[in-house]
Image (cartoon, rainbow, N blue to C red):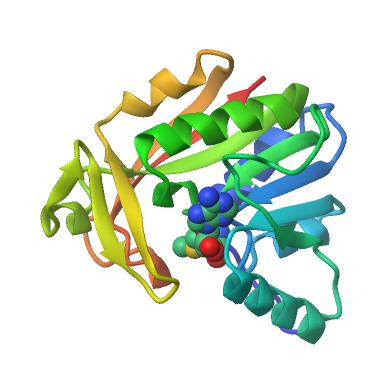
Amino acid sequence: MIKKFYPSSLYTFLRFIQSNPAPKKILDCGAGGPDPKLALFYENGFETFGIDISDDQIKEAENFCMNKNIKLNIIKGDMRNIPFESRFFGYIYSYLSMVHLSKNGTAQAINEINRVLMDGGLCYLNFLSKDDKNFDEKEETKPGEVIHKHRYEESVHTYYDDDEPDDYFHNFKIIYKEKRVILEGKYFNTGRTCVLDYIVKK
Ligand SMILES: C[S@@+](CC[C@H](N)C(=O)[O-])C[C@H]1O[C@@H](n2cnc3c(N)ncnc32)[C@H](O)[C@@H]1O
């Protein structure tokens, strides 16, 4: 089988996880699409769960699972109202998916993550930086929020100043924060040039 490699920030998250005692039960918020990142955690022995708001994106992930003969447990769900009981997960992340929520929606989703994450659990989230080249090309509907047309309909993309997402994490301890600026090229197939990564502990 051809070995698949994943975005580097997911390996950074795994490195924090390896010295954390919470059970290896993980949720991906916005888990659908043809290249489900949950497969990396599956390969590393996690019990995986994912939610996605789009039937088409879930179908694409299901095709991936069928081809690889693996089961990632991706169901329909909105990360602003996570369909799992409180403190169910040891780990939660959202890879370039929460970027589709407004600032109010993001606050709601992080509130939900706080509810379904165990005490001592870790969460990895990334945010789009206002230094991302795409931000300059669009008109803001609200501060930091712009409308993008994508193949799974129109959606908001939300951009942040450095440190601005800190305000979402009053109930967590920020244990890692990184700003990744691409000086030449883009993040592979994401089209992104500047992202803010956060790993937080409950
Ligand atoms: C850019 S794609 C990234 C998908 C995947 N994380 C990856 O890296 O391949 C964003 C995903 O977020 C999902 N999404 C957007 N809003 C959502 C919400 N409120 N709740 C759950 N999923 C959402 C979209 O349907 C889409 O599948």
| Residue at horizontal 59 percent and vertical 76 percent from the top | 56
Q: Can residue 95 be seen in this view?
A: no
Q: Percent position (x, y) of residue 188? A: 40, 70
Query: Which residue is at a point 23% across and 40% down the rendered structure image?
Result: 144
Judged left or right of residue 27, residue 196 is left
Q: How many labels does the image show?
A: 0
Residue 6 position within the rendered picture, expressed as x and y whole percent measured from the top left? 59, 63
Residue 8 x %, y %: 53, 54
Q: Is residue 18 above or below residue 139?
A: above
> Is residue 118 positioned above or below 183 on the image?
above
Residue 14 visible within the image: yes
- In which quadrant will I find the N terminus? bottom right
- Horizontally, residue 134 falls left or right of residue 53, namely left
Q: Residue shown at 62%/71% (left/top)?
A: 55
Residue nearest the observer in this picture, 84 or 6: 84
Asked whether, in this view, residue 54 is left or right of residue 161, the answer is right
Residue 53 position within the rendered picture, expressed as x and y whole percent measured from the top left: 59, 59
Q: In which quarter of the image is the C terminus?
A: top right
Quadrant of the rendered structure where residue 165 is? top left
